Amino acid sequence: MTHKPLDFSQFRGEMNKLSPSRYLELESLVLEKDILDLQESLNQRLFTISELVVFYLSRIMKYNMQVHAVIELNPDAIELAAQMDKELFEGRRRSLLHGIPFLIKDNIGTKDQMHNTAGAKFLEDARVIDESDTIQKIRRCGGIILGKTNLSEWAFYMSSKGINGYSALGGQTINPYGTFDVGGSSSGSAVSVALNLASVALGSETYGSIICPANQNSVVGYKPTWNAWDSRCTIPIAPSLDTIGPITKSVKDARILHHFLSVKGKDCQKVMLEETQYELNFPIKVGVLVNRSLEAEYRDDDALILHEALEEMKKNGFIIESIYINDKVFEIEKNEVLEYEFKHSIQEYFANCMGTPHITLKDVINFNHENLNERAPYGQDLLEEAYFSSITKESWFKMLSRDQKKCQEAIDEQLKTYDVLVTLSNYFSSIYAYAGYPAINVPTGYRKTGEPVGITFVASAHEDEKLLGIAEYYENISHAKRKPPQA
């Protein structure tokens, strides 16, 4: 199993100018810093945006061969950095995102020189003819798209026997904390942020694909309310569930990105951070989900880690109660819904985002069959099941509507009493995602083996600001702070 090598040739000149001593200086100024820290350093001219970009490129060159987190680099990155430096020097800072380097999951279309592949050999040379407002806002607000990240191929909608973080183009993404599951499908985005290969990253989620890798790599993963962020020209699984969302080192950064990049975001306004904060009402009531179906997912040390987190909350203005959610939510029929939606939405993506209406899912399947060892070593049964699916539109709509209502009502019934619901990791992902509700995973501890564990907060639809506010408060009062991996 091989993977596509990164091309640093267009950056060599600028990278060679970064001396070893200056690289070390930048480490102390950049590593583990949040967006506001970086902006303050830019204001003080401790480094330039161009230096920041070259620093991250140097780290990618140094570490990516070990972790396979980045799948492609943006050939325009240094030119974009120079333009942002010029504007900043002239006193024209566009927003808090001005000059901040992003890495983008390689199923999120960017209308530039980069490709959009989902990690698939079939799409190795594919580009998009349109992009989401989310990506356009990054550009308008002065963010710099540094490159694209590896993922579970087709966002883990290729093979039921697949491995988290593997794609034919990108190879196997590796967890920097050890020989642990890297999580999927936004694996490369989570690993990149964990290793400080960029300031922030974007992932995508159908159910669990932001929360799970964030949990596994000790970073913050925020899955917004469905449709709160524009996800156009993201290679789809199920548009009724799919969303773009950020992966960051802190909840504060996730809140800043939501403030600027969501559909209702304040596009590039020069705001003070305080204007993005949600005013919390104390005490904060938390319902901890203890259904047997959820606790059966717990692994070594999980119960103790959760207990310690809850005890810390109790000491800091939280009321904690154990609750049971209606067990009917664990009986949803998501496989049939995904089959139907993928079959039809991928055809729309080929036509509307790639401008290639003649390409079909059958072409993808046939292409892979020509060399399964290289193109589909774990098989492609999910692609084939979707292609041959006979589910009707009426049947799909009936299942989706029934199960979404079931999940929404069950969560909302509890949220009449509680501000947020809490679980660990991605154990509740299929339920909140099916409801279309927001969730955020915050690093909260490490198993005895060193494997990261995060706590997940869930709120109701469009309560994103409240959710982010509670999660940030927990992050601030928690003693179980994120520990960067030993690079």
Image: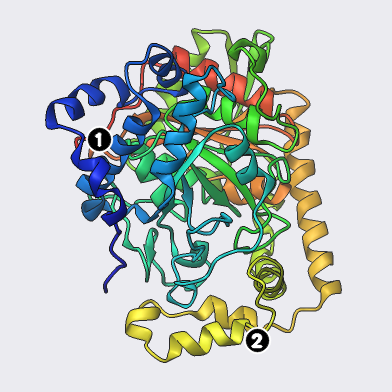
Between disc 1 and disc 2, whose residue precedes? Answer: 2
Which amino acid, mark 2?
Phe
Quadrant in the picture for the N terminus:
bottom left
Q: Is residue 203 above or below residue 221?
A: below
**Badge 2: how crowded within 10 Å, few (<14), some, or many (20+)?**
few
- How far, Cα to Cα, is label 1 from label 2? 44 Å
Which residue is at a point 69% across and 22% down the rendered structure image? 419
Q: Which mark is residue 485?
A: 1
Across and down, in percent, residue 16 comes to 19, 41
Quadrant in the picture for the C terminus:
top left
Which residue is at a point 44% across and 66% down the rendered structure image? 119
Furthest toward the left, the residue is 20
Residue at mark 2:
388
Which residue is at a point 25% across and 25% down the rendered structure image? 26
- Which quadrant of the view contains residue 5? bottom left
Across and down, in percent, residue 46 comes to 32, 16
- Which quadrant of the view contains residue 131? bottom right
Which amino acid, mark 1?
Pro
Across and down, in percent, residue 264 comes to 75, 33
In the depicted view, which residue is nearer to us: 38 or 435?
Answer: 38
In the depicted view, which residue is nearer to us: 47 or 443?
Answer: 47
Q: Is residue 273 above or below residue 263?
A: above
Which residue is at a point 46% across and 14% down the rendered structure image? 476
Numbered label tally: 2
**Badge 1: how crowded within 10 Å, few (<14), some, or many (20+)?**
some
Q: Residue 165, can we see it? A: yes
Across and down, in percent, residue 161 comes to 42, 72
